[in-house]
Image (tube, rainbow, N blue to C red):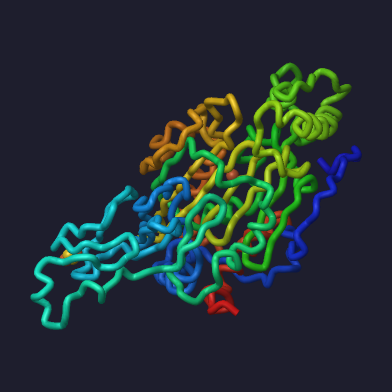
Amino acid sequence: MNKPALEIPVLDIPVHPETMDGRDPSLLRGDRVSGDRYYSREFMQKEWDHMWTKIWHVAGRLVDLQEPGDFVVHDFMNQSVMCVKQEDGSIRAFYNVCQHRALRLVDQSSSVNEFHCPYHGWVWGLDGALKSVHDPENFSQGNPCGKLTLKELRCDTWGGFVWYSFSDDSPGLMEYLHPMPEVYKNYPMDTAVRIFARKIRLNTNWKFASVNFSESYHTRTAHPQVPPWIDQDYWSARSEIWPNGHGRTVQPMRPSLRDRLPEGEPHPFDDILRQWDIDPDSYASFEEKAIKGWMDLKEAKRRLWKERGYVHYEHMNDEELTDSPHTVFFPNVTISFLPDNLIFFRTEPDPKDPTKCTFDLWCMAFPVEGQKEAHGIMTRDFYPVVECEEETVDFDGGRGVPEIIDAIVWQDMMLAEAQQNGWESMGFDDYYLADQEARVRYFHETLNDYLEGRKGGPAA
Ligand code: FES
Ligand SMILES: [Fe+2]
């Protein structure tokens, strides 16, 4: 089917001045994407040397760092980092390693008054200073207290997350994220509550997710449940990229016109309309319901948000009220910004094996007055709107995470494990991409920019 002749309203949404068209292949160099990027240990080492040690990592959620002494531990490759709430309210990041004889200080996120090393009992303050040791007079080179501190890393916050970097001189967090904090200034991100969280061990390279989340060309095939409520036609969406490698697809949350459900089958969009007092039967045709209903929904939300307690709508624009900007923060964090939810997806490499990774799936919901439960969106069920702990599980061919079976992200994971083998095939040379997949190559080109020293260098 070609583009419909129907007139579709275009929203007057300001676009950030540095935005480039993510569907324009002429913006690409055309770097070849060979399969070894997905399985070679040499490539994995290059990623560590030139990319992972330069970028910013999400250590955890700000909500877990309320009181002095609260800390989150983040293990990445062979490193372990802890971000610690200080007495003055700031947050500092330290390598999770005792400066005496290298014992790991803490195993998991928790809260302490000071860090006691379990080996010889050295005591470290929240600020990383060494406070006491046994037999301080027995060090002929001098008492280590007042001398030694835990080794510190750069730490900053954005979006309700605490971030750190292994690099002392690469660009700061705001420069690295630019212009995402501006693009998403209307979302009160730090109010979102994490209602479902799993760290899932997958048999695939970490990059599958960043690439997969950079295009919607696969969705009609892989996720047949999506087109009835999020328009999957590429001509309806905006695909955007920015110089730092971040990119997003903004799709209207309305039925795709070419994915009409069989007559008589309940339509998910009808429920969305009814939720805002719009009668789905008041439209003369399916097309009118999809397009006019989508505009009516914006109007209804704008009129009713306050009395219904949707306080997170206060600053949202007409696009954000109903639509779905799905955003890849280079290299490995994706956030789906939905009107009532944030879904955080993050893959991280296995420390030893490039054909394995972990996938963090955090389903978050904006609290709505009077709503005790919210749908996880990537889950089958509803969950209480209270902060939850993250559990680590094996994907186990799809059986290990029963809560997400048949959900969008589960379908992606099934495909990712199946694709891993294909990367090693001698029958594969390079991608052959549709224009709407241009961001796929843009991702790899940004990665090459890091590996070849064009990005990640000292801040200007
Ligand atoms: S290794 Fe920590 S006190 Fe010895
Ligand atoms: Fe997908």
Answer yes or no: is residue 417 visible. Answer: no
- Residue 125: x and y in percent read 29, 62
Quarter of the picture for ligand 1? bottom left
Answer yes or no: is residue 178 visible. Answer: yes
For the point 53% across and 26% down, the residue is 373
> If the image is split into quadrants, where does the C terminus sit?
bottom right
For the point 33% across and 70% down, the residue is 151
> If the image is split into quadrants, where does the N terminus sit?
top right
Left or right: residue 4 versus residue 371 is: right
> Which of the 4 quarters of the picture holds residue 434?
bottom right
| Placement of 275 over or under 67, stated as above or below | above
Instruction: Count numbered badges in the picture.
Output: 0
> Which of the 4 quarters of the picture holds residue 301?
top right
Left or right: residue 40 versus residue 138 is: right
For the point 52% across and 74% down, the residue is 170
Q: Which of 358 and 293 is in front in this view?
A: 293
Left or right: residue 120 versus residue 386 is: left
| Placement of 305 over or under 172, stated as above or below | above
- Residue 263: x and y in percent read 76, 19
For the point 72% across and 43% down, the residue is 316
- Residue 51: x and y in percent read 49, 70
Q: Nearer the viewer, residue 164 or 215?
A: 164
- Residue 249: x and y in percent read 69, 50
Kindly give the residue lying farthest to the bottom in the view shown: 141
